[in-house]
Image (cartoon, rainbow, N blue to C red):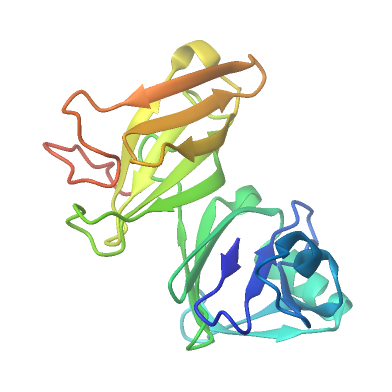
Amino acid sequence: TYDVRDADQPRFFVTEDQPDGALRRYTPDEVDWSNTSEMLHGEGTLEYLVLSPSRRNSNKGKFYWTTDKDDADESAKEHYPSSEGIDVIGSELYFVCKSRKELFILDLDGMTYSKSSTNNGKLDGDPDQLKRLIGDDSSDDKGILYITEDLGDDPGVHGRDSSGRYFTIFESPVFQEDETTGLAFSPDGKHMYVAYQENGILFDIFRTDGMAFTGRVIDIKYHSRK
């Protein structure tokens, strides 16, 4: 994922699904939007995420970027092992820690972070891929964060609004111990595409009310908190 609010200094981010895999931030030396592939693979600065939890509340803290990969790998091993799904919206970076079923939100400007459990209601598997959608018709100015699921009793796709409430888009007991992956949306936001990895089945999902997945939710039943 990327942060291109400053087009003259774009930042690119990637996770590493390893017990000591640090989240990486890459800043290219030469910015050329007419040749983006070369920009990504050219010279630049590679930095790694280090978290510093608060002593008063371990679910919050500060963070910084370092070029010392060993220090960052230690931080990842202790605080966010096996990170995977990642997305950036505005000044906020979201990523999940699969092994601990946690969602992290980094304030890229304030250099602070918070984390929360994703183990809510029917999202009982490991959180995997993330995709946030924001639309003009959304009742939530931060949109909805969609989360795919690895394993669990009924793996599917779930949503989380900016208030931290979770709800289920779909799930299937037919594909137990499988993994939903490849989450994507049509340009108008009205079709969700997602696959079950082990079974090799791709689904095209749409709302019966004809609204986009960025739109308001109606009569939604939220997950109970654990």
Left or right: residue 59 versus residue 188 is right
54 is higher (above) or lower (below) than 176: below
Q: Determine which quarter of the picture holds residue 221.
A: top left
Q: Is residue 1 left or right of residue 188?
A: right
User: Which residue lies at the image location 28% right of the left edge and 41% below the top edge?
Assistant: 223
Residue 166 seen by the camera:
yes
**Left or right of residue 105: residue 209:** left
Rendered location of residue 197, percent (x, y): 64, 24
The residue lying at 70 percent from left, 79 percent from top is: 50
Q: Residue at x 19, y 29 (%)?
A: 210
Percent x, y of residue 133: 37, 52
Query: Residue 213: x percent and y percent?
Result: 30, 40
Of residue 137 and residue 166, the one placed in the foreground of this image is 137
The image shows residue 170, relative to residue 37, as above or below, that is above
Residue 11 percent across, percent down from the top left: 64, 75
Q: Nearer the viewer, residue 74 or 216?
A: 216
- Displayed quadrant of residue 39: bottom right
Name of the residue lying farthest toward the left:
219
Left or right: residue 109 versus residue 182 is: left
Residue at (41% x, 36% y) in the render:
186
